[in-house]
Amino acid sequence: MKKLFAVIIVLLVFFLAMDACDNDRSSSEEYKIIENDKMVDVMVDVHIIEATLRNKKISGDSLKKLTNNYYQTLFDKYNISRQDFDSSFAYYEANVGQLNNIYEKVIERLNKKQRKLEQIQKEQREKERNRDEPKKSVD
């Protein structure tokens, strides 16, 4: 759970930095705000992407290219643009109550996925153990 909160904080800082560096966007330009439930879905996938990237044994340009590919796949999956995501995150960040609500749901879903994964891993270990045990013959 502590790791999850650390990841959330890192991502918040990351998105704040990205927003601050976004000089291409004119102040009059507006993008669609991703609705709350969809934003939860997107953020669950963002955290899965970030966890996956942290576990990769690559760096530099290869990591940057892989990151871009993962995020483009995410944006395509939800039919949103990078600008939609960034402006939505900035909107929810400015509306802390809504952001907290989103992250409560994100954490709940990630915990559920983690429990499911742990259950699958446990079942696989039990199958392997049973397969490796010598079978008793019945006389």
Image (spheres, helix red, strand yellow):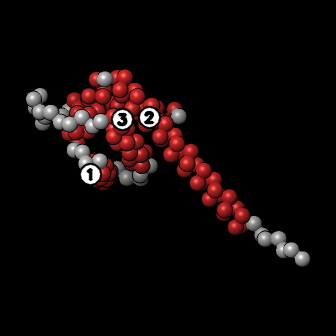
Which-is-in-front pick, marks 1 and 3?
1
9 shown above or below 127: above
**On the image, which quarter does residue 86 sit in?**
top left
Mark 3 lies on a secondary structure that is helix
User: Which residue lies most toward the bottom here?
Assistant: 139
Closest to the observer, 35 or 84: 35
Q: Amino acid at mark 3?
A: Leu
Question: Dot 2: within a 10 Å radius of its alpha carbon, few (fewer than 14), some, or many (20 or more) residues?
Answer: some
133 shown above or below 7: below
**If you read the primary sequence from the N terminus, does the residue marked by circle 1 or circle 3 appear first?**
3
Q: Amino acid at mark 1?
A: Asp
Question: Dot 1: within a 10 Å radius of its alpha carbon, few (fewer than 14), some, or many (20 or more) residues?
Answer: few
Mark 1 lies on a secondary structure that is helix
**If you read the primary sequence from the N terminus, does the residue marked by circle 2 or circle 1 appear first?**
1
Q: Is residue 36 visible?
A: yes
Mark identifier at residue 76 = 1
Q: Measured from the top left, where is residue 101 in percent x and y?
A: 40, 28
How far is disc 1 from disc 3 in space, using C-alphas?
A: 20 Å
Q: Amino acid at mark 2?
A: Lys
Q: Measured from the top left, where is residue 131 in percent x and y?
A: 70, 67
User: Which residue lies most toward the right here?
Assistant: 139
- The residue under label 2 is 105
Dividing the image into 4 quarters, which one contains the C terminus? bottom right
Query: Residue at coordinates 36% horizontally, 28% vertically from top-left?
Result: 99
How far is disc 3 from disc 2 in space, using C-alphas?
A: 16 Å
Query: Residue at coordinates 11% horizontally, 28% vertically from top-left?
Result: 27
Mark identifier at residue 11 = 3
Query: Residue at coordinates 39% horizontally, 32% vertically from top-left?
Result: 102
**If you read the primary sequence from the N terminus, does the residue marked by circle 3 or circle 2 appear first?**
3
**On the image, which quarter does residue 62 sit in?**
bottom left
C-beta proximity under 8 Å, tags 2 and 1: no
Question: Dot 3: within a 10 Å radius of its alpha carbon, few (fewer than 14), some, or many (20 or more) residues?
Answer: some
